[in-house]
């Protein structure tokens, strides 16, 4: 997943108004959680380091995947977390995804679920030389654990395993049945892992109370001089649709060109879409995201955000100027493929453009198609929706008890951290579970600063030792709180 893009949204969006008079708010507790559990920190770090050394790399072409590494990683989990292995039911689904079930004592409560993925994106050829520490060595140095997957999402998966092992060793017994799924193909769509696990649960008529997945982080320093961190809980994610525009006409020799051409016609259509993007919205979820930050903003920022009835237009136009904030406000259109022509002196008879739209929860696939037809105003251009179109997710309620439990657990774990609901502009495996619950939350307590943005799927991916321990403690608390009656 690409949670860091979410951070980008808020980092940049909050820079939009002058910050000269921002309140300097420091957070006395950025590095330590409140209460802590008696966990063996060295052992937990050592296990994370070892886990990162398995090259569980996802590739589109499955024949290229080294599944032995997946088998080895699964064996490693069994060996290093013996209490889970001995006490919880587990099954393998889609060959390499793991589903664990921890039976609760109160069958009257709906089960809960936590998911993550242990596959990672490849390190681009040649990039490994740019890493400070080799991407699959799991080096622990300078207060960090370095390696592909440290942030996305092997660190998440390992922190869940640490929490479960700890709770089992302590003799904890959940009231509510708890499912944990560790997926193996999230980075390539999750069709074999998450989708099959969701179907498997549906076949048993299981309804979940809620589901927690990877997602947005705790963003630090999101406005200059305001250091109060914001934990963003992803309550919705965008949809995605690829639209092909195709245009054909008689060809001919380039010495006698016709007045209109395939390339010209398609270019005009693309231009018309660029000139007027889909409508931006500054209402609903995005307003809630900013709300807790308002008291910490500068005078001018506060004025704007407190009086959206007057400043909505200005806020929208400022946010629209930046690609990251723009993505939080509206359905975006990325022109990704343009094909026409094959020879310098031959007029093309056929051309096509593909536009990838990321659909905001305020719109639907049908809205996008209608918008495209309306904008291009040319019935001779064929508009086609390509396979795998996906509407935006439903928006999970912030009033629901599981949201409140998650919020409270974050507040208990990280004092001085503000919490708000937010839009996840990427996608994760959670999208396969919408038929099992309406309460889906995308969050990992990873502390992310501006400079960490490029580490996810990039170079020098790492997590700080302190943050990883905080994450394990958070997962322990979340499982304890989340398996009791809400
Ligand atoms: Zn991910």
Image (cartoon, grey):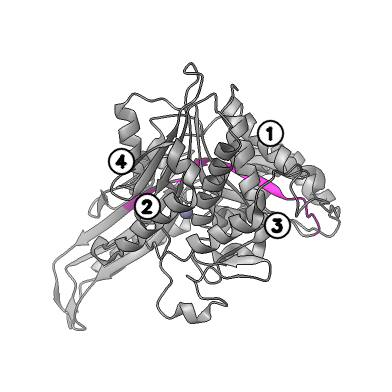
The secondary structure type at the circle numbered 4 is: helix
Residue beneath disc 1: 408
The secondary structure type at the circle numbered 1 is: helix
Which one is in front in this view, the residue at disc 1 or the one at disc 2? 2
Q: Residues within 10 Å of mark 4 (few under 14, many from 20)?
A: some
Name the residue: 46% across, 36% down: 87
Name the residue: 65% across, 45% down: 473
Q: Residues within 10 Å of mark 3 (few under 14, many from 20)?
A: some
Q: Tell which circle, 1 or 3, labels the residue nearer the N-terminal end.
A: 3
Q: Tell which circle, 1 or 4, labels the residue nearer the N-terminal end.
A: 4
Name the residue: 47% across, 29% down: 438
For label 1, being within 8 Å of ligand 1 is answered: no
Q: CA distance from mark 1 to mark 3?
A: 30 Å
Which of 396/20 is in front?
396
Q: Tell which circle, 4 or 3, labels the residue nearer the N-terminal end.
A: 3
Which of 367/218 is in front?
218
Q: Tell which circle, 3 or 2, labels the residue nearer the N-terminal end.
A: 3
| Rendered image: mark on residue 196 | 4
Q: Position of residue 135 (x, y in %)?
A: 49, 71
Q: Position of residue 273 (x, y in %)?
A: 41, 56
Picture quadrant of residue 196:
top left
Q: Compared to 470, does 288 lie above or below?
A: above
Taking the image as drawn, is residue 318 in sight?
A: no
| Rendered image: mark on residue 184 | 2
Magenta region: which residues? 225-242
Residue beneath disc 3: 16
Name the residue: 32% across, 50% down: 96
> Left or right of 175: which side holds 182?
left
Q: CA distance from mark 4 to mark 3?
A: 43 Å
Q: CA distance from mark 1 to mark 2?
A: 30 Å
The secondary structure type at the circle numbered 2 is: loop
């Amino acid at each position: 997943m690409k949670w860091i893009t979410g951070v980008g949204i808020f980092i940049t969006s909050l820079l939009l108004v002058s910050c000269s008079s921002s309140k300097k708010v420091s957070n006395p507790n950025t590095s330590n959680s409140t209460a802590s559990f008696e966990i063996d920190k060295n052992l937990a770090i050592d296990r994370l380091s070892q886990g990162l050394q398995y090259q569980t790399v996802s590739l589109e072409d499955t024949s290229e995947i080294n599944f032995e590494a997946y088998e080895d990683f699964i064996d490693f989990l069994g060996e290093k977390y013996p209490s889970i292995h001995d006490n919880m039911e587990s099954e393998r689904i889609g060959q390499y995804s793991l589903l664990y079930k921890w039976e609760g004592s109160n069958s009257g409560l709906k089960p809960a679920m936590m998911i993550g993925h242990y596959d990672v994106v490849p390190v681009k050829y040649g990039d490994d030389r740019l890493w400070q520490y080799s991407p699959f060595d799991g080096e622990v140095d300078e207060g960090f654990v370095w390696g592909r997957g440290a942030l996305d999402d092997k660190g998440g998966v390992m922190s869940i395993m640490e929490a479960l092992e700890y709770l089992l060793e302590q003799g904890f017994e959940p009231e509510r049945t708890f499912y944990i799924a560790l997926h193996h193909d999230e980075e390539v769509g999750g069709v074999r892992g998450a989708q099959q696990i969701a179907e498997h649960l549906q076949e048993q008529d299981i309804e979940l109370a809620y589901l927690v997945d990877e997602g947005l982080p705790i963003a630090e320093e999101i406005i200059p001089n305001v250091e109060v961190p914001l934990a963003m809980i992803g309550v919705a994610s965008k949809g995605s649709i690829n639209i092909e525009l195709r245009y054909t006409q008689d060809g001919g020799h380039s010495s006698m060109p016709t007045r209109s051409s395939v390339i010209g016609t398609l270019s005009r259509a693309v231009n018309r879409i660029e000139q007027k993007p889909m409508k931006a919205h500054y209402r609903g979820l995005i307003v809630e995201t900013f709300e807790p930050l308002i008291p910490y903003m500068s005078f001018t920022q506060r004025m704007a955000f407190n009086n959206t009835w007057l400043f909505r237009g200005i806020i929208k136009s400022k946010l629209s100027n930046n690609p990251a904030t723009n993505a939080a406000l509206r359905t975006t259109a990325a022109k990704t493929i343009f094909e026409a022509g094959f020879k310098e002196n031959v007029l093309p008879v056929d051309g096509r453009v593909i536009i990838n739209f990321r659909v905001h929860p305020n719109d639907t696939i049908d809205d996008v198609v209608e918008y495209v037809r309306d904008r291009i105003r040319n019935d001779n251009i064929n508009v086609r929706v390509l396979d795998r179109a996906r509407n935006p997710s439903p928006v999970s309620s912030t009033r629901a008890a599981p949201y409140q439990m998650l919020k409270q657990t974050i507040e208990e774990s990280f004092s001085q951290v503000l919490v708000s609901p937010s839009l996840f502009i990427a996608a994760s495996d959670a999208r396969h579970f919408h038929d099992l619950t309406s309460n889906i939350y995308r969050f990992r307590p990873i502390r992310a600063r501006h400079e960490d943005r490029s580490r996810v799927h990039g170079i020098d991916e790492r997590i700080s030792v302190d943050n990883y321990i905080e994450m394990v403690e958070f997962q322990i608390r979340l499982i304890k709180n989340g398996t009791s009656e809400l």
